[in-house]
Image: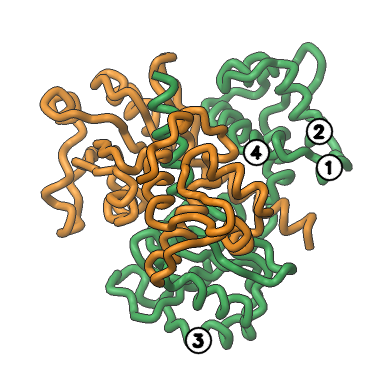
Chain colours: A green, B orange
């Protein structure tokens, strides 16, 4: 039985950002019935060198053995743990427009330990499947008093982001995952992670101009 | 009249990734009737130092003048140009599920020079507003022969990503914006940009564990 690596919390950010790709490869292999994989095989799939793979995975797992490679089942467990996917976290979502609905319906979140408890919007949802899960924005602070909420997902239009952020902060939610295409202002103790599609699109245009 | 900076194509990646935030601040100021902004004012809004702001913006614009600051209208034009938002690009989208629909309906894309010409899916869309814009996947290569397509947006489930990618490559589309939660394999001349929500969620969990 492999024990959990005590250094998991010291994993570096670049390694952390590669872990979901490793998880993807490992999960697909496991579903195909593969039981062991070498770091070279994993690296080939992702375009990483085997030294890089060994180093990344050694920082979060003991599932690798010389010559026989990684135990796929154990490695999957260890990566999920390092990514925090084995813990359940609870979110609310503000702004049930197209992007909000897409995220509320995204089944991948459940696999990654995220449960969206409710969506909040100034107007009720016209989407039948979400009707019972969408509450008026005025009910947010009451909802947060009664339920444990780790995270607010912000999917309102840019011009509503300041108001929505103020409601989130007032409700005492400690972290915001910001999909609104704008900068938000929060007190220092609130964690903000920006998911900026415009940023990504600008980078893509730049690469298309310079790489081809 | 400010001329376009000839060094725009030498903008560094970190600067490039900050440009959408600058654009956001500048656009909001312009809408509020502000005509000039100093680098200190812009920096304050974003949490950047004024030296950083001056350096970033000098690499893409001549709209800044000592003492009077930046001409807001000119700076907005220059940032949009540096980001490629002033050029029209044409995309198709593969996989009209929740995420695909959200992106097809995302109005921000038009502002950023991206037009989604059509969506493709193995089954027709049940979304009335998209009915005329969703074609069967089998029609992709014919569509690309008749229309100029710069980019494929991939929003299929992970297990369909390999097949969809093969169709995109066969249709001769030179770039893929990958929202599918998996790694895709393409020939070297095809540009892939991954939009990995799982990666981002893992990073967020990690920050919530270590920063609070």
Q: Residues within 10 Å of mark 2 (few under 14, many from 20)?
A: some
Residue that label 2 marks:
A59
Q: Which mark is residue A209?
A: none
Disc nearer the start of the sequence (1/2): 1
Residue that label 4 marks:
A17
Element marked by disc 3: helix
Say which residue appears at 44% left-offset and 73% top-offset: A160
Given residues A129 and A126, the one toward you in this image is A126
Disc nearer the start of the sequence (1/3): 1
The chain ID associated with circle 4 is A
Residue sitting farthest toward the top:
A67
Element marked by disc 2: loop
Disc nearer the start of the sequence (2/3): 2
Given residues A36 and A173, the one toward you in this image is A173
Q: Residues within 10 Å of mark 4 (few under 14, many from 20)?
A: some
The chain ID associated with circle 2 is A
Element marked by disc 4: helix
**Mark-to-mark CA distance, 1 and 4:** 13 Å
Residue A13: % across, % down: 72, 40
Task: Report if residue A156 is visible in the image.
Answer: no
- Have a look at marks 1 and 3 and say if they share a chain: yes
Closest to the camera, between mark 1 and mark 2, is 1
Depicted B193 relative to depicted A38: above or below: below
Residue B167: % across, % down: 28, 24
**Mark-to-mark CA distance, 2 and 3:** 43 Å
Residue B69: % across, % down: 53, 57
Given residues B122 and B84, the one toward you in this image is B84
Disc nearer the start of the sequence (1/4): 1
Residue that label 3 marks:
A139
**Mark-to-mark CA distance, 1 and 3:** 39 Å
Residue that label 1 marks:
A10
């Amino acid at each position: 039985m492999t024990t959990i690596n005590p250094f998991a919390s010291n994993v570096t950010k670049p390694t952390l950002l590669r872990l979901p790709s490793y998880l993807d490869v490992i999960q697909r292999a496991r579903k195909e019935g593969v039981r062991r994989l070498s770091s070279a095989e994993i690296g080939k799939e992702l375009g990483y060198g085997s030294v890089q793979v060994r180093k990344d995975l050694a920082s979060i797992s003991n599932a690798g053995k010389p010559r026989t490679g990684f135990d796929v089942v154990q490695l999957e467990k260890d990566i999920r743990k390092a990514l925090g996917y084995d813990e359940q976290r609870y979110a609310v979502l503000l702004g049930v427009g197209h992007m909000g609905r897409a995220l509320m319906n995204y089944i991948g979140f459940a696999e990654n330990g995220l449960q969206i408890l409710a969506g909040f919007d100034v107007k009720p949802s016209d989407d039948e499947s979400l009707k019972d899960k969408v509450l008026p924005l005025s009910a947010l602070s009451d909802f947060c008093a009664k339920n444990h909420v780790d995270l607010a997902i912000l999917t309102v239009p840019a011009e509503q982001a300041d108001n929505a952020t103020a409601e989130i902060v007032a409700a005492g939610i400690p972290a915001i995952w910001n999909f609104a295409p704008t900068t938000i202002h929060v007190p220092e103790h609130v964690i903000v992670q920006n998911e900026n599609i415009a940023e990504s699109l600008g980078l893509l245009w730049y690469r298309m101009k310079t790489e081809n």
